[in-house]
Image (cartoon, helix red, strand yellow):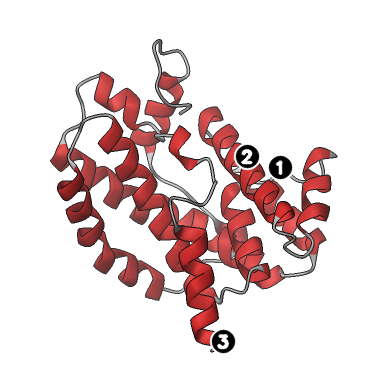
Amino acid sequence: MAELDATLAALQLGDSFFPSGANAFSWGLETLRNERLLDRAGLEAFVAGQLEHRWAHFDRPALLAAWEAGDHLESVYAIDRLVDAATLAREAREGARRLGAALLKVHEELRTPQAALYREAVAAGEAPGNLAVVQGWAGRAFGLGREAVVALSAHQLVTGLVSAALRLGVLGHVDAQRVLLGRRAQIAALAARPAPPVEEIASSAPMAEIAMMRHETGSGRLFAS
């Protein structure tokens, strides 16, 4: 029953019905689409690159470090500040904070243990509330194990990108599902690698970061990033 309960928890957190606010962000895809640099093949390469060159070496270590810190909130806040300092593009940094704040708010309303304390720390400037860190911490507090938290994080990254591409008219619903299916093996392979220490987080996704920087001055924007 414990395994079933954890599965149900993961399904609840990963459902598009969960009010995470992620549909407001394209993470640079809108700029690439507007500049005619994105098609179906380009989208698949973009998603694969985000998984390989950012998520595996940046989000995942932060996520796992926050999961391992558990109830020790001061350690979680330190990880949070590190992630914030290492996020170069302003839209990426602000987006991660906004999504983390939205997730914390929902968890406070769900009465997830210590969510209110974490929100107070964010309001006081003690922690920025980055999404990857909040995901790891809240996932554990909500009853998810390490593997489930990692799988949920990767799934939400890919579905968020594919959903944005769908709204931008890059592909249709069935093709969107094909992209999701095509990334499963990559996610499994990346998740099987040892995660680097959180002090060594690194991201090498210049195309996405430059697109987000250019998005900042764009006009007629549908997305916040």
Q: Nearer the viewer, residue 16 or 22?
A: 16
Q: Amino acid at mark 1?
A: Pro
**Residue holding disc 1:** 128
Q: Position of residue 154 (x, y in %)?
A: 41, 59
Mark 1–mark 2 CB contact (< 8 Å): yes
Q: Position of residue 142 (x, y in %)?
A: 64, 68
Where residue 222 sits, quadrant-wise, is top left
**Residue holding disc 2:** 97
Mark 3–mark 1 CB contact (< 8 Å): no
Q: Amino acid at mark 3?
A: Ala
> Alpha carbon of mark 2 to alpha carbon of mark 3: how far?
32 Å
The tag earlier along the polypeptide, 2 or 3, is 3
Residue occupying image coordinates x 47% and y 33%: 24
Q: Secondary structure at mark 3?
A: helix
The tag earlier along the polypeptide, 1 or 2, is 2
Residue occupying image coordinates x 54% and y 55%: 201
**Residue holding disc 3:** 2
Residue occupying image coordinates x 22% and y 61%: 181
Q: Secondary structure at mark 1?
A: loop
Q: Secondary structure at mark 2?
A: helix
The tag earlier along the polypeptide, 3 or 1, is 3
Does 42 appear above or below 215? below
